Amino acid sequence: MAVKEDILKFMSSRPETEAIIGYGSGVNAQYGQGNRKVQIDLIVVVDNLKKWHLENIKKNPKDYSFSGKLFFKHASNDKLRSGGRITYMTYIPFEGHEYKIGTIEKKDFIDDLKNWSTFYISGRMQKPILVVKASKDINLAIEYNRFAGLLVTALLLGEGEYDEEYFYSILAGLSYIGDTRMGIAENPDKIMNIVKGSFDFYQETYGSHFDIKDGKIKVKKEKTDKLPDDLKEFLETYQGNIGDGIREFLVNKNKSYSLDQTIKGLFTTGLVKSVKYVHQKLKRKRKK
């Protein structure tokens, strides 16, 4: 795959990583995207955020805005891990492409996928991704997180038969429930565009877990004992039906951490690149 080779070449001049994962429309084209060129989004898993960025600033100073350099040099490692535990840099040019790098420590990456402690990374990892490099424990965490997303979708919908595309759209939309960016900068058709553009991925990854006949998924009654720990603990004290409890949990997570990451992005990517990023999203939204 050409994009995988491009990513490996781009990352070869950067410090050592635990994992490299591509996601978003730059890796898996969305429905209606056409020939529009977009950033290649990467999640880069590292051992220590502060150490990785200090080394990368020396190797690739142009990856950073002026404010980004100051932030990564002077902020503590705990500060870098605040919010959704990930730090982003955008619009990094390399051989005809632009890259967006999100760096996260391995312990935080695995914790979020297993426990949904922030759900900021978990929701992205349930959608189509390209695993460029990963260890066995990271791959296992990705697989569990997908199972958890499937289980939560089934619990939200309840027993019954559902159109396959509709079921996948609920699954793909988990990370957008309560996200502060939805309805402002994000295209309202984004969820369905993701599903339609990667329908084969959803069928192969999730469809095999169900009885499917004539495009209908048969959902059986599911138990909650295999849910991520943070969600399970939330539901144990929630007063109401399980579907409402799951939605409230996701709203709390997505709203809080999407806002935190937006604010942190002003420091890590700089004001100019942040404004450019939002402007590009608004421009694409207006074209719909």
Image (cartoon, rainbow, N blue to C red):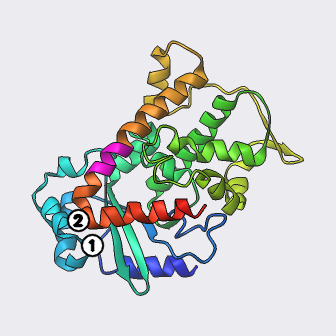
* Side of 159 relative to 20 (left or right): right
Indicate the secondary structure of the residue bearing disc 1: loop
The disc placed on residue 235 is none
The disc placed on residue 52 is 2
The disc placed on residue 15 is 1
Whether residue 165 is in magenta: the answer is: no
At 52% from the left and 78% from the top, the residue drawn is 3
Nearer to the camera, 107 or 257: 257
Q: In the rendering, at what x and y percent does residue 78 appear?
A: 19, 47
Q: Main secondary structure of the magenta part?
A: helix
Q: Earlier in the sequence, mark 1 or mark 2?
A: 1
Q: In the rendering, at what x and y percent does residue 45 appear?
A: 36, 60
Dot 2 crowding, Cα within 10 Å, few <14, some 14–19, many 20+: some
Nearer to the camera, 270 or 163: 270
State if disc 2 and disc 1 touch (CB < 8 Å). Answer: yes
* Quadrant holding the N terminus: bottom right
Q: Residue furthest front?
A: 286
Q: Is residue 38 visible?
A: yes
* Side of 49 relative to 221 (left or right): left
- The amino acid type found where label 1 is placed reads Pro
At 27% from the left and 67% from the top, the residue drawn is 272
Stretch in magenta: 258-263
**Relative to 272, residue 210 above or below:** above
Indicate the secondary structure of the residue bearing disc 2: helix
Name which quarter of the figure residue 223 lies in: top right
Q: Residue furthest bottom?
A: 95
* Quadrant holding the C terminus: bottom right
At 64% from the left and 41% from the top, the residue drawn is 170
